[in-house]
Image (spheres, rainbow, N blue to C red):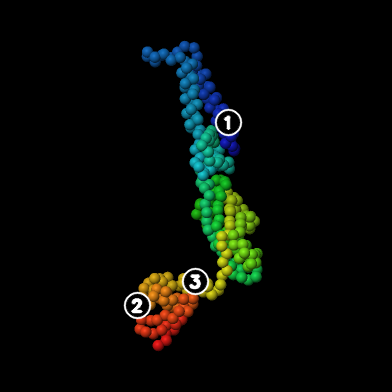
């Protein structure tokens, strides 16, 4: 059985009033109580005890739902799907109803990048930033924050890939900042993603056209994990070269042809190295 916060306040107020009234009627009457030399009128003591009982019940029934959290309600120990938002003054008639668990609904941000070919065959990469807006603690309780972030990134990559494929190259380069929130919902409606109680805002931040030659250079860099050590070795082998010249030699060794290789690099022994080839 579900009980909304408003209805819960009414039930708590009525129940507290009934219990406090019962205490008052039970103890009230003519005369007074004697405690040694002290005499206390029965009506006054009954009113004081009724007020204390009402206060203790109110404290017992008070529910604290912290900022940026939501509480999941239970009825006789069983989840009933009712979710309470954050608030300073929440009262629930325990032990029949209670709050089983509080879940954080703080927004969190993630970044994602994906690449795909346009319908024209151009290889493009789009970077985007997303914001997850939790809306329902009942759904959030079904998955951890780490797993939720992982799935958000995966589904966002799918959305970005579909976005690249349906847009021509000119549009992608002309409008690098684009709101994909509606497309995210449309593309993943069949995943029933809203069962996790999260609304997603997804916007692109940058569009990059992928050049195959550039990708080859990145692959060459990835195969060489200790560039600094190699450059230091070159400094010993070619002590008279500058930093730029040594990095150019390193680039030649790993197969990169950067613009700096248009310079002539002189070795320590007087030989000339041009584009990776020695000339005596």
The residue that label 2 is drawn on is: 239
Residue at 41% across, 71% down: 227
The residue that label 1 is drawn on is: 10
Q: Earlier in the sequence, mark 3 or mark 1?
A: 1
Judge depth for marks 3 and 1 and give the one in front: 3
Q: Nearer the viewer, residue 164 or 33?
A: 164
The residue that label 3 is drawn on is: 218
Q: For residue 179, what is the image quadrant?
A: bottom right
Residue at 41% across, 13% down: 39
Judge depth for marks 2 and 1 and give the one in front: 2
Q: Whole-Å distance between the Cαs marked 3 and 1?
A: 66 Å
User: Which structural element holds mark 3?
Assistant: helix
Q: Whole-Å distance between the Cαs marked 2 and 3?
A: 28 Å
**Residue 273 badge:** none
Q: Residues within 10 Å of mark 1 (few under 14, many from 20)?
A: some
Q: Residues within 10 Å of mark 2 (few under 14, many from 20)?
A: some
């Amino acid at each position: 059985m579900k009980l909304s916060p408003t209805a819960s306040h009414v039930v708590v107020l009525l129940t507290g009033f009934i219990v406090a009234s019962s205490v008052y009627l039970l103890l009230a009457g003519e005369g007074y109580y004697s405690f040694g030399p002290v005499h206390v009128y029965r009506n006054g003591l009954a009113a004081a005890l009724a007020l204390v009982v009402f206060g203790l019940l109110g404290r017992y029934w008070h529910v604290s739902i912290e900022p940026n959290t939501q509480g999941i309600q239970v009825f006789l120990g069983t989840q009933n799907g009712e979710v309470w938002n954050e608030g300073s003054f929440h009262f629930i008639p325990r032990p029949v109803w209670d709050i089983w668990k509080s879940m954080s609904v703080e927004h969190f941000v993630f970044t994602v990048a994906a690449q795909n070919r346009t319908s024209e065959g151009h290889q493009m990469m789009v970077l985007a930033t997303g914001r997850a807006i939790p809306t329902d603690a009942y759904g959030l309780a079904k998955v951890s924050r780490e797993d939720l972030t992982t799935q958000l990134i995966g589904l966002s990559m799918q959305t970005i890939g579909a976005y690249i494929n349906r847009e021509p190259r000119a549009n992608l380069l002309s409008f690098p900042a684009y709101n994909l929130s509606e497309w995210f919902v449309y593309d993943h409606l069949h995943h029933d993603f809203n069962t996790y109680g999260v609304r997603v805002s997804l916007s692109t931040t940058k569009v990059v056209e992928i050049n195959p030659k550039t990708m080859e250079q990145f692959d060459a860099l990835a195969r060489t994990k200790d560039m600094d050590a190699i450059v230091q070795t070159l400094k010993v082998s070619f002590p008279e070269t500058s930093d730029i010249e040594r990095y150019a030699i390193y680039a030649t060794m790993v197969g990169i042809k950067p613009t700096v290789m248009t310079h002539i690099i002189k070795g320590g022994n007087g030989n000339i190295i041009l584009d990776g080839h020695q000339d005596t």
